[in-house]
Amino acid sequence: MKKVKTIFWQVAVVLPLLLMLAACGGRTGTASTREPFDLDVYTNQSGSFAYIVGIAMAEIINEHHPWIRMVAVESPGGQANEMMMYDSDDQMRRHTMYFATANNAYRGILNFEGRQHTNSKIVFSYGLLLQGIVSVDPRIRRWEDFEVRRFGGRSSSAILNDFIQAMFEGKGVRNVSIERLDFNAGVEGVLGGSLAGWLSAYNAVSPDLMEWRGNPATEEFHARAREIYFIDMPLDIDRTLRTTPGGLFEDLFIVVLEVPARAVHPRQTEPWVATSQVNQFFVDQIFSEEVVGEVLRLIVDNSQRLVDFHPQLEFVSPQTMALYSFPPEFHPGAVKFYESLGVRPTYLGDLIDELNRAN
């Protein structure tokens, strides 16, 4: 009788294992036993929009995925992230997702000059950044009014500063000094009178681009400025710069657009022409297609949860995640994911044209 009991218990234990193995097609690895995949996401300084998105992604992935483990890393910023990836080894490239300014690496400018790096591929876009010229000086209403004055440009975007400089020159304004400043320094400079104007920044809140919200420095500017003058980018010069064959701005990742009145602030009483670009995360082309697909799936499945981390993440949807503002170099894993949802990568300029026709 004892032998019969032993055989019974052996069958009771082994038979379910055999059935489970058959159901798995003979594979012994499962989601629960698979070795964890460690993924670092390099963002920007703590408190920045990119850093908040990285934290949100990491919490969602770690909470819901059985084998991907993500850590959000505070980093110096987009251009530094690109240089880090350029100089890293394949092991790091296979385990790193990063926020980047993108155009620097693609065009080979600044530190990339002479050694252009094209291995960066888009994973997803998480928002649109609008940058436009504002002033508190009633004498500053046109580009020509900046003659022999100081202007607050961007500290981290050489190509945008070059674009602004070329616009000034195109308007015949050759004696303006463009100072490379971070956002907070720009606010203090324009409010204190040492700058005639500066590049404020806003992020899209609605996918129809009808509502934008200022970053912390811009909101500080709004709160302290007694008057705000919104200076239009010159569309005629923009077209001239982009139609120069082989010119520096022929494939510029910045898109110039007109935002409706009061889209960025109640004191913006007229439509305003400013520049826009897409905020994005990248991986190297050797990054796992499977991991890219899994990360994107969880972001889409938990898009409402993203809003708990930052209200501007209400902008995120499969359609907006597939936006780009320069040549569409999406990672193959991202392309497969978007195609599975019936979404194709869309150029920001085409989206703007479509929305203008609809309105």
Image: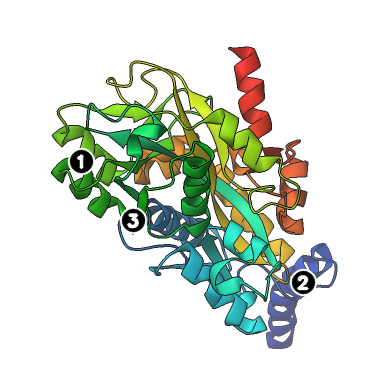
Mark 3 and mark 1: Cα distance apart in space: 20 Å
Return the x and y of residue 308 as percentages of the image width and height. Answer: 36, 42
Q: What residue appears at the point 42 percent right and 25 percent down from the top-left corner?
A: 211
**Left or right: where 180 falls relative to 243:** left
Q: Is residue 171 visible?
A: yes
Return the x and y of residue 30 as percentages of the image width and height. Answer: 68, 69
Q: Residues within 10 Å of mark 1 (few under 14, many from 20)?
A: some
Label 2: which residue? 15
- Amino acid on which the number 3 mark rests in the picture: Glu
Q: Please name which of the two marks, 1 or 2, marks the residue nearer to the observer.
A: 1
* Residue 220's disc number: 1
**Foreground residue among 106 and 13:** 106
- Amino acid on which the number 1 mark rests in the picture: Glu
Mark 1 and mark 2: Cα distance apart in space: 68 Å
**Left or right: where 282 falls relative to 54:** right
**Foreground residue among 347 and 198:** 198
The first of marks 1 and 2 along the sequence is: 2
Mark 2 and mark 3: Cα distance apart in space: 74 Å
Quarter of the figure that contains the C terminus: top right
Q: Residues within 10 Å of mark 2 (few under 14, many from 20)?
A: few
Return the x and y of residue 36 as percentages of the image width and height. Answer: 58, 75
Q: Secondary structure at mark 3?
A: strand
Quadrant hosting residue 25: bottom right
* Residue 327's disc number: none
**Foreground residue among 158 and 50:** 158
The first of marks 3 and 1 along the sequence is: 3
